Image (tube, rainbow, N blue to C red):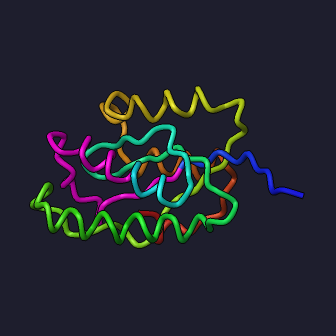
Amino acid sequence: MSTYTQILYQLVWGTKRREKTLDKKNREELFKYIRGLCEKKKCLAYQINGVEDHIHIVVDVHPSVAVSDLVKDIKLATTQWIKKEKVFPRFSGWQAGFGAFTYSIKEKERVVNYVKNQEAHHAYRSFLEEYIEFLETHEVCYDPKYVP
């Protein structure tokens, strides 16, 4: 029997200390690079976006890939790429943790549209406010001292 899955993740993580280092000018290059990393892992990235201090990825993760390994590999590879290509000169790294929130495939369009509109969302609320809302909406127990 083959393995079949349908788990839609929204992965979210920020820059170290929520520093606003992901300049708009080069973000699309970063997102294309991340899309390629996902493809190499047999994962389908439906949408990647973000603002100066964090990113979101809506992705179908292949069953052979642990979500934590995917995030770790993306963070390591993008950090090296950013330093090599000098696309974000003030970038000092990613935060230690990440958020991984699951959705039904029926919610894909809504989640993709949410991620597409990151700049509009963050015109009136911070990454921290958004992240806490995700944690609370998904009923994740958390310690505020460890929230990014």
- Identified at 79% across, 51% down, the residue is 4
Quarter of the image where one finds residue 2: bottom right
Residue 76 sits above or below residue 109 on the image: below
Q: What is the quadrant of residue 141 in the picture?
A: bottom right
Q: Position of residue 100 (x, y in %)?
A: 58, 56
Vertical side of 146 occupied by 122: above or below: above
Residue 27 falls inside the magenta stretch: yes
Would residue 71 be found to the left or right of residue 108 on screen? Answer: left
Residue nearest the observer in this picture, 10 or 62:
62
Above-or-below relation of 128 to 80: above
**Which residue: 30% across, 61% down?**
15
Horizontal side of 5 relative to 85 (left or right) equals right
Residue 130 image offset from top left, x and y in percent: 46, 44
Q: Residue placed at 43% from the left, 69% from the top?
A: 73
Spot occupied by residue 12 in the image (x, y as percentages of width and height): 47, 53
In the image, which residues are magenta?
Answer: 11-34
Q: Which quarter of the rendered picture does the N terminus lie within?
A: bottom right
**Residue in the picture at 56% in, 52% down:** 43
Q: Position of residue 18 (x, y in %)?
A: 29, 59
